[in-house]
Amino acid sequence: MSDAPAPEALVRAVPFAGELGIVVEEAAPARVRAALAWAPERCTVGGSLHGGALMALADTAGAVCAFLNLPPGASTSTVESKTNFFRAVRSGTVHAEAHPVHVGRSFVAVRTDLRDEDGTLVGQTTQTQAVLTGAGRTDAGAAART
């Protein structure tokens, strides 16, 4: 897809990501970069960024990456996601970098690395996104293209 939507439009297409404070920093079919700042309301016991917040960051970056690899008129939905957590995040900003590992007619698989401000790997997510065409298409694809 050569005419990639602006990062702001991609976040608007995923309102939950905006509510969490996720920012898409770079968006291209080969790589999507997004970020989420630590905040007390996003934490669990001990001031650690909640795993669900980290998973939402990875899912958002991965979904945007999958979306940018879709054929015209298609949309996508996560059908599988697996996350490994390696260390807690207690301050700063987490940076996500998503890359496609498989782009097919029915599914797109994406790997997203989550790193803290020092560049240390804090988590890694592999997800599968369904390619939705025709009747299975949602309005999210059209919203992101505007």
Image: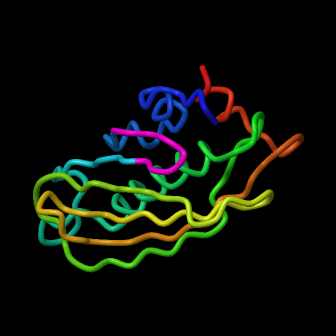
Q: Is residue 59 left or right of residue 137?
A: left
Residue 43 belongs to magenta span: no
Q: Is residue 41 left or right of residue 33?
A: left
Q: Is residue 65 left or right of residue 57?
A: right
Range shown magenta: 24-32
- Residue at image position (48%, 29%) is 12
Please provide percent x and percent y for residue 29: 54, 45
- The one of 48 and 132 positioned closer to us in this rendering: 132
Please provide percent x and percent y for residue 91: 10, 58
Q: Does 47 sit above or below residue 134? A: below
Majority secondary structure of the magenta segment? strand
Residue 109 sits in quarter: bottom right
- Residue at image position (71%, 42%) is 75
Which residue is farthest right? 135
Which residue is farthest top? 146
Please provide percent x and percent y for residue 146: 60, 19
Q: Does 126 sit above or below residue 2? A: below
Q: Does 84 sit above or below residue 103? A: below
**How many numbered markers are drawn?**
0
- The one of 90 and 86 positioned closer to us in this rendering: 86
Q: Which of the image's four quarters has the N terminus?
A: top right
- The one of 106 and 76 positioned closer to us in this rendering: 106
Please provide percent x and percent y for residue 46: 12, 71
- Residue at image position (60%, 31%) is 2
- Residue at image position (68%, 49%) is 76
Chosen colour scheme: rainbow
